[in-house]
Amino acid sequence: MKQSNVIDNKNAEHTIESYRFKVLGAFPTNDVKEQETVSNLEEQTATPVPKQEEQKENQTHQEEPKLEPSFIEELLKRTDELSGNIIKLQMQIENQENEFKVRLEQEVTRAKDEALKEGHIAAKTEFEAELNEIEKKYMHSIEKLDEEKSKLEALYASSQKELASTAIEIAKEVVIKEIKDNSSVVASNIAKSLISELNDATSIEIKTNPKDYEFLKANLNLNSHIKVTSDDAINAGGVIVLSEVGNIDGSVMARFAKIKKILSE
């Protein structure tokens, strides 16, 4: 550092000489003595003030410590160390931030996986519960259907006989009406059907009601081994076939009775 003086070089060589006051004769003796005393005091105080100030300033500058090169070097070294420590601290903070970011991402991923797993388990449990409930309802419905099926089967079994009997009765009424109107035709058809069943017989006799006798005799293909006879015991519309292989009651009422017996078994 460059040191400078307040007083320049020109003023440094300047000196102030003491000033002597002139003694005036008009003043009395006492005044002269007082004047001399004042003059002496002025001589004592009239010293070169600028030189004293310059000396004090120089002394002050000399007392100020000088900055040594080693101190500057040490200061720069400490500054470098401090900068290095700051950089290391910044790098450490960045590393910690990166680690925290990675850990945060890992925790978020883990939380998502756990949430998905828990959600999957919860959904599976709920689905299984609903499935079990549906299965129970389905099995209950099947049991109900089986019960209804059993009831229907029992009803059908009981109704089947009734329906068959009813159907036979209806057919019987229809046949009775047909016999009333065309008994000969009915008797002829029954006789033809029974003859076809006795192909092995060598002698066949067909008994019929006198009302139907002429019609059967005229409409049946009578061979030497087949003959038609009249019998009042035979109801109109019916026939009885006699042969060596067996006798067949072809009356309508007998046939209906046989059918009803078969259905009731």
Image (tube, rainbow, N blue to C red):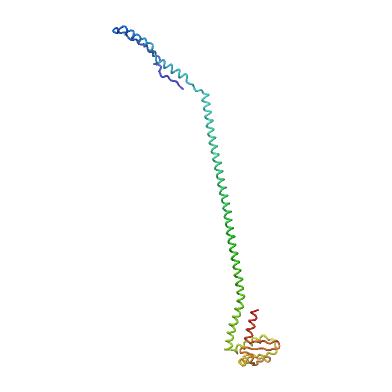
Q: Quadrant of residue 95?
A: top right
Q: Is residue 215 left or right of residue 19?
A: right
Is residue 176 or residue 208 the one in the foreground? 176
Q: Is residue 193 left or right of residue 75?
A: right
Query: Residue 24's x, y, as percent?
Result: 30, 8
Query: Residue 174's x, y, as percent?
Result: 58, 84
Q: Quadrant of residue 244?
A: bottom right
Query: Residue 40's x, y, as percent?
Result: 37, 9
Q: Residue furthest left?
A: 26
Query: Residue 86's x, y, as percent?
Result: 53, 33
Q: Residue furthest front?
A: 30
Quadrant where the C terminus lies? bottom right
Is residue 184 or residue 28 the one in the foreground? 28
Q: Quadrant of residue 150?
A: bottom right
Q: Is residue 24 above or below residue 72?
A: above
Q: Is residue 29 left or right of residue 50?
A: left
